Image (cartoon, rainbow, N blue to C red):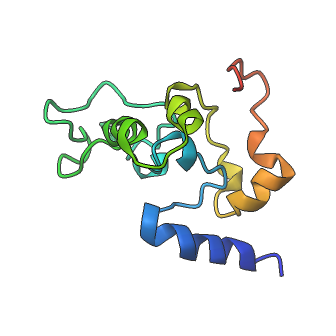
């Protein structure tokens, strides 16, 4: 059933990582921190507005997602070294047409690695 997989994925990932079902999961390269929870949905943060206390410029009550991601990538137990290193890699812009689809399926099909025409980033 085509619609079932996104429901299962969301049920698994939402409670643990506050997954927003972008369809291009990069949790492994962000210290298991979902970048879609950044109010600016930055894939390569942080922005220039991080507060002195490490909190978000848009939502002062929350810690900056990217400060958290960098910290977790360095300190989270059991994270493979290759995943830790990926936090510094350049990630392509999110493809909003994949919103709500299963990143598991998109990983298997390779759809999550399709980049926008003209994007000059370096794939790692
Ligand atoms: S401060 Fe951090 S969480 Fe807030 S908008 Fe900037 S990058 Fe995103």
Instruction: Name above or below for residue 42 compared with residue 99.
Output: above
Location of residue 100 by image quarter: bottom right
Q: In this rendering, does residue 18 appear at all?
A: no
Q: Is 112 or 73 nearer to us in this picture? A: 73
Q: Residue 94: x percent and y percent?
A: 62, 41
From this view, report whether residue 2 is shown above or below residue 100: below
Give 25 or 73, whichever is nearer the viewer. 73
| 19 on left or right of 68 | right
How far across and down, in percent of the image, does residue 35 sit? 47, 45
Q: Quadrant of the C terminus?
A: top right
The vertical placement of 1 against 40, above or below, is: below
Whole-percent x and y of residue 15?
Answer: 44, 72
- Residue 30 located left or right of residue 22: left
Give the residue drawn at x 67%, y 44%. 95
Q: Which residue is drawn at 29% across and 41% down?
A: 64
Query: Quadrant holding ligand 1?
Result: top left
Quarter of the picture containing the N terminus is: bottom right
């Amino acid at each position: 059933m085509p619609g079932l997989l996104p429901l299962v994925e969301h049920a698994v990932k939402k409670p643990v990582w506050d997954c927003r079902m972008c369809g291009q999961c990069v949790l492994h390269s962000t210290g298991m921190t979902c970048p879609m929870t950044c109010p600016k949905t930055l894939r390569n943060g942080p922005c220039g507005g991080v507060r002195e206390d490490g909190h978000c410029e848009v939502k002062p009550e929350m810690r900056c997602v990217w400060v958290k991601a960098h910290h977790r990538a360095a300190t989270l137990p059991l994270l493979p070294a290759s995943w830790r290193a990926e936090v510094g890699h350049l990630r392509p812009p999110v493809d909003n047409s994949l919103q709500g689809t299963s990143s598991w399926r998109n990983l298997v099909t390779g759809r999550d690695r399709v980049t926008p025409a003209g994007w000059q980033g370096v794939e790692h």
